[in-house]
Image (spheres, helix red, strand yellow):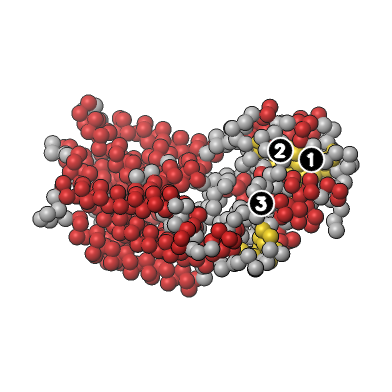
Amino acid sequence: MVPVLLFHAHLGGMSGGFVGVDVFFVISGFLICSLIVKELDRGDFSILRFYERRCRRILPALFAMFLVTSGLASLVLMPPDMAAFGRSLLSSVCFVSNVYFWKVSGYFDGAADFKPLLHTWSLSVEEQFYLVAPYLLVGISAFLRRRYLTFLIPLALGSLLLSEWGVSRTPSAAFYLLPTRFWEILLGALLAVSRTTGTERRPLREALSLAGLVSILGACFLYSEDTRFPGFAALAPCVGAALIIYAGTGGTSLVGRLLASTPFVFIGKISYSLYLWHWPLFALYRYRVARELTWVEAVILLTASFGLAVLSWRFVEAPFRQARAGSGRRAVFLGSGAGALAAATFAGTAMATGGLPSRVPGFEIVATPGEDEYDVGGQGTCFLDDTQQVSDWGRDQCWVTRGQGPRVLLWGDSFAAHYVPGIKHRAHLVKADILQYTLSACPPVIGFNTLSNPPCNAFNQQVLDVIREYDIKGVIVSGRWDYALRRHVQPEQIRASLERVLSSGVDVHVIGQSPLFGNQVQTLFAQMGGSSAQPDGWGTVTFSTDLNEKIASAAPSGIKFIDPLQQFCKLPSCQYREQGKFMIWDEGHFSAYGSEVAVEKYFPYVTQR
């Protein structure tokens, strides 16, 4: 739990502290399956009793967190984000928030740090496991003569291989979904059903537990958000946790005594409540201040998280853990249903009303997009989406300018297409015939392949043919580079792709990442008290400020690199509104006005004013 907290607080240098969730999966698999197998051995396992225990253990503190977080969200979140909160709350109540956050993650996703219920994805994975585990173990016990390992080992290996495959093809799904996380929980389950205990030899026990601790801590300090994860990279923390558990079943060790010390036992007791409460506090506070936290703020929020966790454990968790008069199984299930219904009703209200806009008088006056559409032309023909085929590209229909000069190809995703309105409106300044070749959510990197955007690989592969066919003399490459790096595109891949284009004998310009914000800029403007009379607006960018330096360093010699941030930003802040007009249409795409400004300031083949 501690690594997760420090990672979320951006403290302690634990850039890989997120692996604490994987350690938790292993421990959970061990504890839950140990309980089920013991009851199966005794012949008194009950499905109803199993789910009653899960309801007592999980739901009271969860519903309390839902109640308080919903109240705080109503005070802090602007209407569009309140509506999104309602959707996340409903998915959390139904224990499918991992699916929800997977579906909304990726190219058009807002900043994860601002989503108060994002942490419930791991709880949903756990709950989905609870729907499978008892029936799986009961079936093996009844029909396979309790040969648990025979069935579970291939299942775990299959899940691990799927996870590794998914990391490169669909990383968001690999991160959030049960099938690619199943092996982590099964690793703990395998320890439980194997019926083996750790070695009685003290030196070996010490070595195993120490190796496990080093493996976990190594991942905490050496991994980062750039690590391809989970996949094989998750083996280090998961196997580390399994080694500590295995050694502990054989007797004491120095690591075991450390983990059994009073501070760690205390943290273990409140760990569930601590996990529930810390993230909403961080997310809502970050949303309110719209910037990174200072270390003082992070420490204060951590302290508050511990205080809430202690109160939650003492007055919510502990009383509901034990059966008491008037709190039998029927009462537990009815109470669980009533709590879920109440949370779902609030979620539905927030969704149906568009985020309870009456809370923010005058919100619509300043919180409307600056332009109706950032892609003025080419939608469906020159700017394709992921439901189309490469053959749908409009070819000769995609000339943005004609009779202006050398033939130039504009290649990229929507962060290339958002320059098209400016090119059209400032065509008299353009000294080239520009051909639009763009596909949504498809970084301009030859060899990039993802299941979430099937035509992307073929689209990028075809760019060399387009260059030859149209006798292209120059190529302008632009994309959402932070997305490419989050999808584990390496700088070497970008370099290799650009070298292939350069080898075609064309001039190449690469436009770096333009400003990106954690929310729709209109919402940010309203959140900060902006009014229609206020001409300018600035916000903090969501990506690392050295992103464009990474892209520039990946570009081979002979390529001209353009950094948009130099025109719009005083990092870490960038301007999104000037002279009473929004230059950004949503979180990062230029509005038509912003596109004109960008084209005039730095776009290649344009006469700069």
Report helix, strand or loop for mark 1: loop
C-alpha separation, residue under disc 3 versus residue under disc 1: 20 Å
User: Left or right: 296 with respect to 421?
Assistant: left
For this rendering, which residue is in front, 332 or 230? 332
- The foreground one among 468 and 434 is 434
Horizontal arrangement in the rendering, residue 108 relative to residue 584 (left or right): left
Tell me whether the residue at label 1 lies in contact with that at label 2, contact meaning CB atoms closer than 8 angstroms. Answer: yes
Task: State the residue at coordinates (79%, 49%).
Answer: 425
Residue 186 locus on image (x, y percent): 34, 40
Give the x, y percent position of residue 489: 61, 44
Residue 378, label in figure:
2
- In the rendered image, which quarter contains the C terminus? bottom right
Which residue appears at 44% of the width and 71% of the height? 299
Query: Badge 1 is on which residue?
Result: 400
- Look at the image and tell me whether residue 321 can be seen: yes
Q: Which residue does the numbered mark 3 point to in the structure image? A: 371
Q: Amino acid at mark 3?
A: Glu
Categorize mark 3 by other alpha carbons within 10 Å: few (<14), some (14-19), many (20+). Answer: some
Pointer 3 with pointer 1, Cβ within 8 A = no
Spatial CA span between label 3 and label 2: 16 Å
Q: Earlier in the sequence, mark 3 or mark 2?
A: 3
Task: Please tell me in which quadrant of the rendered image residue 35 appears.
Answer: top left
Tag nearer the camera, 3 or 1: 3
State the residue at coordinates (56%, 68%): 529
- Give the secondary structure at mark 2: loop
Q: Residues within 10 Å of mark 2 (few under 14, many from 20)?
A: many
Q: Indicate which disc, 1 or 2, sits on the residue closer to the N terminus.
A: 2
| Sooner in the amino-acid sequence: mark 3 or mark 1 | 3
Write the residue at 55% across / 34% down. 451
Expressed as whole percent of the image width and height from the top left, the position of residue 434 reads 81, 41
